[in-house]
Image (tube, rainbow, N blue to C red):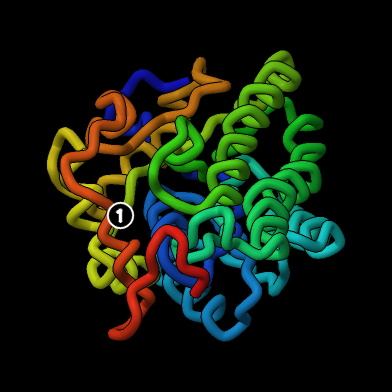
Amino acid sequence: MTTDPDRLLRLDGRVALVTGASYGLGVLFADVLARAGADVAVMARSADKLADTRKLVEAHGRRCVAVEGDVTSYADCEAAAAACVNELGTIDVLVNNAGWADDRLMRTEHVDPESFARMVQVDLVGLFYMTRAAAPTMLAAGRGSIINLSSIFGMAGSENRTAGYFAAKGGVNQLTRQLACEWGDRNVRVNALAPNFFISEMTRTLLEDSGMATWMRSRTPMRRLGELDELVGPLLFLASDASSFVTGHVLTVDGGWSASGGYAQLPQPWDEWNGEAGTPIGPVTVP
């Protein structure tokens, strides 16, 4: 391992696989890994958007393979891992980014069971499927970095919603620790990123229109939400040799949210919001 600080975060000669790479953080992660020198395989359900991500990676002079697939299908995960190995040679870094959250912000007593099950299936079971499909290649090679996308809402309970997301991300954190213990002796590191809310194309309308952005700023010690480029350093740290002795760690990138004890200065404004102008959604009102 190099001690040259200019090379420590480089990924030259490495191959990364990123799920959920058709928009938002998945596109950012694929772009960052390519700029750091990695060839990148990208997976998502949207073939047309994946094509755009592939062009972005290739614009950095890196190879890219795009695989249309759904992480809730183990067969799709196996196909993505196989395509990465067959076309790019191996898998050195896996970024389990694919996920889904119910943005209706409903109290749990009003949530349909199917929505809860879907969040757990995508955010936890799908993450396990992709990990299970990719890990044998890493274990056989005796090296690898798996980065799971968790959330601050996997760290503790909150007045926020919804229960399926909290349960899934808590499971992600514990799965991260378990796999780190199992695979550390073969030099496969397993860590997680747990971000606060970050403004992106997927979250902007929800956060600002519902009032959640103001509420989250009020309980975050740094009094702001994250900027997407503030995830670049944490991602490269976990993906590269800079974190060669770090495994089983859930790295919060949250402006101090998880250190604050959860104190909220403002009430929850989304009890009065239903996604558009109209009848407020109260705590005992079924929308």
Question: Percent x, y for residue 72?
Answer: 75, 60
User: Is residue 228 among the parts visible in the rendering?
Assistant: no
Q: Is residue 197 above or below residue 158?
A: below
For the point 81% across and 37% down, the residue is 136
Q: Residue furthest left?
A: 223
- Left or right of residue 238: residue 167: right
Q: Position of residue 172 (x, y in %)?
A: 61, 37
User: Foreground residue, 42 or 4?
Assistant: 42
Crowding at mark 1 (Cα within 10 Å: few <14, some 14-19, many 20+): many
- Which residue is at 51% across, 35% downward? 192
On the picture, is 269 further left or further right than 11? left
Where is residue 57 shown, x and y percent of the image?
Answer: 46, 66
Q: Position of residue 109 (x, y in %)?
A: 58, 55
Quick one: SS at disc 1? loop
Q: Total label count?
A: 1
Q: Which residue is mark 1?
A: 198
- Most foreground residue, 48 or 196: 196
Which residue is located at x 31 percent, y 39 percent?
233
Q: Is residue 265 above or below residue 162?
A: above
Q: Is residue 261 left or right of residue 105?
A: left
Which kind of residue does numbered mark 1 sit on?
A: Phe
- The image quadrant of residue 66 is bottom right
Give above or below for 38 relative to 222: below
- Most extreme residue toward the right is 75
Q: Residue at x 77, y 30 (%)?
A: 139
Q: Visible in this render: residue 279? A: yes
